[in-house]
Image (spheres, rainbow, N blue to C red):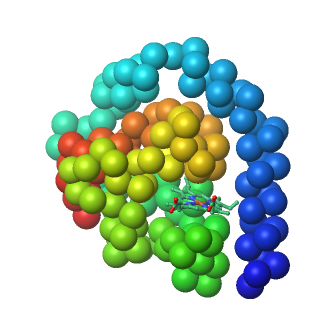
Amino acid sequence: MREELIQCVRRAAVALLLLGGMAGAAACASSPEAPSNAAAALIPPGGLTFSRDIQPILSTRCVGCHKASHLTAGVDLSSYAGVMREVTPGSPSSVLIQVTQPDGVMYIALGADPSQKAAEIRSWIVDNHAAP
Ligand code: HEC
C-alpha cells in the first residue's frame, strides 16, 4: 500500500514536471474569467448533475488513484458519497474546486481540455449545489 502511494506520488510529480510548464503557460495566457465564460456556452440549461456530467470526468481521470481499493490521500471519488466529502454545496472553496483549478495540484490529471472540465466541476458545485 505504501509502495503504491509512493509510486503514485512519483508519477504525479513526473507529470507535473513534464506538463507543469505547459499548464502554467495556458493558465497565464487566459484571464481567470475565460474558462468559465467559454464553458458557459456548453453547460446545459437545466444545470449540471453528478451522474450525467461530473461522474464521467472523475471516473476517467481521477478514480484510478482515488477509490476504496486505492485510497490515495484518503480521497474516494468513486461514488457520490465519497465525492461529497470533498464538496461543500454552493461553496467556491470546496476542496474539489481548489484541487481542479489551474493552480490546483490535480489540474494536470484532468487531461485534455482541463479548463473546460475544471469549469464544469466548479459550476456543478457553486451554481448547481452539487446536484446528484
Ligand atoms: C496519478 C494518481 C492520481 C490521480 C490520477 C489523481 N490524483 Fe488526486 N491525489 C494524488 C496524490 C498522490 C495526492 C496527494 C497529494 C498531496 O498530498 O500533495 C492526491 C490528493 C488529492 C486530493 C486531496 C487534496 C487535499 O489537499 O486534501 C484530492 C481532493 C484529489 N487528489 C482529487 C483528485 C481529482 C479531482 C483527480 C482527477 C482530476 C485526481 N485527484 C487524480 C494522486 C492522484
Looking at the rendered image, the quarter that the C terminus falls into is: bottom left
Q: Is any atom of residue 53 visible in this view?
A: no
Tell which of 10 and 53 is nearer to you.
Answer: 10
Residue at 73%, 73% in the rendered image: 5
x and y percentages locating residue 107 in the rendered image: 57, 44
- Give me the residue at 42% from left, 60% from top: 55
Say if 71 sits above or below 28 in the image: below
Q: Residue furthest front?
A: 93
Where 126 falls versus 131 (above or below)? above
Q: Position of residue 113 (x, y in %)?
A: 56, 34
Where residue 63 appears, x then y in whole percent?
57, 67
Query: Quadrant location of ligand 1?
Result: bottom right
- Residue 44 visible? The answer is yes
Task: State the residue at coordinates (36%, 28%).
Answer: 36
Q: Quadrant of the N terminus?
A: bottom right
Q: Is residue 88 left or right of residue 33?
A: left
Q: Is residue 103 left or right of residue 81?
A: right
Query: Total label count?
Result: 0
Residue 43 appears left or right of 104: left
Q: Is residue 89 left or right of residue 28?
A: left
Query: Which of the pair 112/76 is nearer the observer?
Result: 76
**42 in relation to 74, above or below:** above
Residue drawn at (65%, 31%) of the image: 23
Is residue 59 depicted above or below 98 in this figure?
A: below
Tell me where residue 65 appears, x and y as whole percent: 64, 68
Q: Which quarter of the picture shows residue 103?
A: top right
